[in-house]
Structure formats: C-alpha cells, structure tokens
Amino acid sequence: MIDFRYHLVSLVAVFIALAIGIVLGAGPLREGISETLDDEVAQLRTERAELRGQLEVQSRHATAKDEAVDLLSPRGVAGTLNGTRIATVLLPGADRNHVALLEDRVADAGGALVLRVEVDDSLEEGQVDQAVVDDLAGRLALPEPREGDQPTIGAVLAASLVGADREGEVGAWLAAGERLQDEGLVDLAWQDVQAQVTDRRPPDVLLLVGGGLSAAALAEEDPELERVLEVRQDLVAGIAGLEHPLVIASAGAEVDALAEGGGQDGLVRAVRDDGRLSDEVSTVDDLEAASGRAAAVLALAWELQGEAGHYGLGDGSEAPVPAPPPLRLASGPGAGAEPAATEPVPDDSAATTAP
C-alpha cells in the first residue's frame, strides 16, 4: 500500500522539476530557443518574399505569352473555317466576354456565325412541359433513345439545332426552334447576310459554350445541379447521335487551376469521362486564355474533318491546342507551301529527324 511519504516525495520532485525549468527557461536555454525561433521566422519571411517575387515574374511571363498568342492567333487560324456556317449555343452561365472574343476569333478563321442560341435557365430546371417535348419529337428525327426512355428536351433541342426533320416533314426543325422560343426555353438570333437575306439552312458545325456548372460543385452531389448536367448531357449526346460536328468550350482550367476540381467545367469533365462521347465530341477547357480560344476554333475545323480531340490544361486534355488543320478553300501565293497536318494531336513517337 502506497503511504503518505510516497505522495510527498512525488510532489516535491514535481516542484523541483518545475523550478529547474523556470530557471533554465529564464537563463541559458531561453537565449538559445529565442535565437532559433528568430532565425526560423526570418528564414520563412525570406522564402515568402522570394516566392512572391517568383510568382510576380511568372505572372508577367504568362500574361506576355497570352498576349503574344492573342496577337498571333488571327494569322494562325486564318483560312481554317472558310465557307463554314457556325452556330454558337450559349448555356446558362456562359461568360459573354469570352463568347465575344471567341466569336471574333471564328471570324478571323473565315467562319460565318449564322445563328446564336441562348438557352434559358428554365430549360434546365425541369420547367418544360412534357407534352410540348412529345409533340415536337413526333416531327423530328431524334437520335435513338435508351430503351424505355421518353423523348427529352435535350434531344429535341439537339434535333432542332442540326436540322433533323423526320421523314416526310420539311422545315420541322425550324418550326421546333420557334416553338421552343415561344415557350421561353431558348432565344434564337439568326444573322443576316448579304442583301439582308437570312440564310436558314442548318449550320455546318455547332460551338457549345458552357458555364455555371463546375466539376467541383457537382462533386457535392446536389440533385438540382445533377439535373442540369443530365439535360446538358442529353443535348450533347443528341447532337453526337445525329453525327453532327460539335465543340464544347468552357473556361476555368487556367485561372482556377488550383481550386477544387482544377477549375474544370462539369460538362467538359463529364464528356471526357464518357468513353463514347469523348470519341465523338471535341472539348476545350480554358476559354479564358487566348490559347483556349484558338484551340476552340481549330477544334471546329478538325471536327469538320471528322476528328475529335480534347484541348486545354485540365484533366483529360490531349494537348493545349490542336495542330493547324488543312486550310479550306485556300488559294493564292504560298497556299499549301507547308504540308497540312493529318491529325489534330500528332504522335511524337512517329517523328523522324532529317539527315
């Protein structure tokens, strides 16, 4: 049995140890510890200043390179979309500044922007009358639905964008677009051409601009966001199922690269993760950068060649930009002076060195 003397000795030992610690801390050890801490703090401050300086330099270099790419892009994309009729489709959340700059680059490539379609939030929020969808589906050549599935608004919109009439129906796709506009689901703006004549033929290629739906937000498993993604995937799958050239472009992979999800757009990530769609549809994930806008234009040209690819800086990208595609309707001195690329992402292993 432990007696009182044991407790007394233990208590005295504790006080002696405490006293020794106080004396040493206030004396010789204090100076050593203090000096060590001061040195470490000074070193951290120096490292922070160096890192800040490196970041500023890298930021200036990145800005200069982006400006250089922006300056050279008009020449780099020129002629790649000559004679091509293009429709831009703006999903809710698409950045209008990015869209304007992208459309300027399309014009530099010689493409004709014949139609702009702005999708309303209500189309993605489950506010669509299924009776309207069924009625329009009866006159359009929709892609094959999954077994047992009803026609979806995404599939109907896809058919109306690519001009897919059901056999025996003429101009049903135009009427479908107008009906969707009357329902407040989309806004259509056809562009007039020469002599104020509106060309109402289906576009040759579609440029779908995403936004407002990040991959990071989708990771939270929000049912509302998942419904929005499903509608967008239906639209993309519908266009791909009708074998129409399509490029999906979105922003975020450059300016938000360090954020959760790498700043990628949720639709771009979903398409890249889909084994079937990734082989049929092209994507660009850094539309905020000059290189991203150039990549989107060149991707349009490659889509017209039947070649899909994924470009940018985020997960699933194959290259920052595709190789220059063959010029369309090129003529004049110097045309074809260099051999055209045969694929958007050349295989480095196949390269040979000239003797």
Image: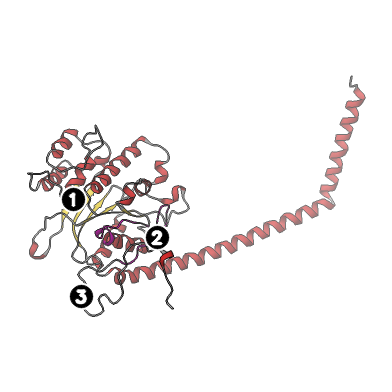
Q: Give the quarter of the image for residue 181.
A: top left
Q: CA distance from mark 1 to mark 2?
A: 28 Å
Can you identify the residue that label 3 sits on? 331
Left or right: 136 as drawn, with respect to 215: left
Segment colored magenta: 301-324
Q: Amino acid at mark 2?
A: Ala
Q: Give the quarter of the image for residue 245.
A: bottom left
Magenta stretch: includes residue 307: yes
Where's the N terminus, which quadrant?
Answer: top right
Can you identify the residue that label 1 sits on? 162
Left or right: 88 as drawn, with respect to 64: left
Q: Residues within 10 Å of mark 2 (few under 14, many from 20)?
A: some
- In this view, the residue in front, 285 or 128, is 285
Q: Residues within 10 Å of mark 3 (few under 14, many from 20)?
A: few
Q: Earlier in the sequence, mark 1 or mark 3?
A: 1
- Residue 319: mark in rendering: 2
Q: What's the residue at 31%, 37% (across, down)?
A: 227
Q: Secondary structure at mark 3?
A: loop
Q: CA distance from mark 3 to mark 2?
A: 29 Å
Q: Secondary structure at mark 2?
A: loop
The furthest residue to the right: 5
The furthest residue to the front: 355
Q: Amino acid at mark 1?
A: Val
Q: What's the residue at 36%, 64% (across, down)?
A: 290
Q: Earlier in the sequence, mark 1 or mark 2?
A: 1
